[in-house]
Amino acid sequence: MTDSTPHSRHAARRGAGKEASIVREVAVIVVVALVLSVLVRSFVAQAFFIPSASMEGTLQVQDRILVSKLSTELSGVHRGEIVVFVDPGGWLPEAVPPTGASGVIRRVLMWVGLLPADTGEDLVKRVIAVAGDHIVCCDARNRIVLNGIPLVESYLKPGDGTEQVRFDVTVPPGRVFVMGDNRGDSEDSRFHLDVAAGSVPVANVVGRVVGVMWPASNWSGAPIPAIFENPALDVAPAARPAVDTGGDTAAPSGEAVP
């Protein structure tokens, strides 16, 4: 058995110190990355998961979407935007949080932004009307009429219309009227007309959908359709001639039309 020399002991200590330094650096990098991830998720952007078919035609089931919170904070919510919002109450069944170790891990990963949010409390729809807008379903050709102007909605899922529910409402201040692009399979503002004309508080809007991140085959942006850029939509409805609705009057709020 031989004793180690002072040089070898010094080399061993130096090696151990170097390893400890690397571990500290990695730990700092991980902590900084997690903090940045939480900050980005909280104030800039967040990923979400699409669980239902209500936006088919534009967003597919299991799509992962990127939602910009910053754009909503800076410029507000506008007609034609696809937005994620928190259930204003009664739109979704009560969420049952996952249990066990896997549930805890999943919630932590969603909280730090490493998994798309899927809490069962958020919805994704398209903003059709904003505060002060007068929106009617429908004209003689089953088109939504917004501030007296019929909308040609090319983004709808083929074969789907809006005439399942007739309505005639003015959006209250601080709120928006939302609908899914898959009108035949979307329980949206049309089905909650008894509360604030079916509208959603702007304060509940989490952010605007920027586009689909995953799967790669569905990569796409989410631009505002050109019909919502029409300056005439901002003209007072009373200043326009009446739109032919085919002689039909709007059914009472929330009443399904056969």
Image: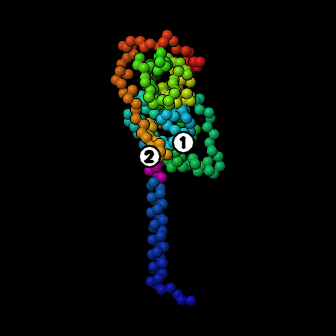
Q: Residue at x 54, y 42 (%)?
A: 62
Q: Quadrant of the C terminus?
A: top right
Q: Which mark is residue 159?
A: none
**Foreground of the two, 139 or 109:** 139
Dots 1, 2 in contact, CB < 8 A: no
With respect to residue 116, does 242 lie above or below? above
In the drawing, what numbered circle is on residue 40?
Answer: 2
Please tell me which of labels 1 and 2 falls first in the chain. Answer: 2
Range of magenta residues? 34-40
Quadrant housing the N terminus: bottom right
Instruction: Say above or below: 65 vs 101.
Output: above
Residue at figure coordinates x 50%, y 31% from the top left: 157
Number of disc labels: 2
Residue occupying image coordinates x 47% and y 21%:
144
Q: Amino acid at mark 1?
A: Gln
Real-space Cα separation, disc 1 to disc 2, in angstroms: 23 Å
Instruction: Decide whether the magenta segment is chiefly helix, strand or loop.
Output: helix
Residue 253 shows in this picture: yes
Side (left or right) of 233 relative to 257: left
Residue 108, percent across and down?
A: 55, 49
Q: Amino acid at mark 2?
A: Val
State the residue at coordinates (39%, 16%): 237
Queried whether the magenta region covers residue 38, the answer comes back as yes
- As drawn, the residue found furthest toward the left would be 231
- Measured as percent of width and height from the top left, residue 128 is found at 45, 26
Query: At numbered mark 2, what does the secondary structure look like: helix, strand or loop?
Result: helix
Tell me if 3 is positioned left or right of 102 in this view. left
**Residue matched to label 1:** 62
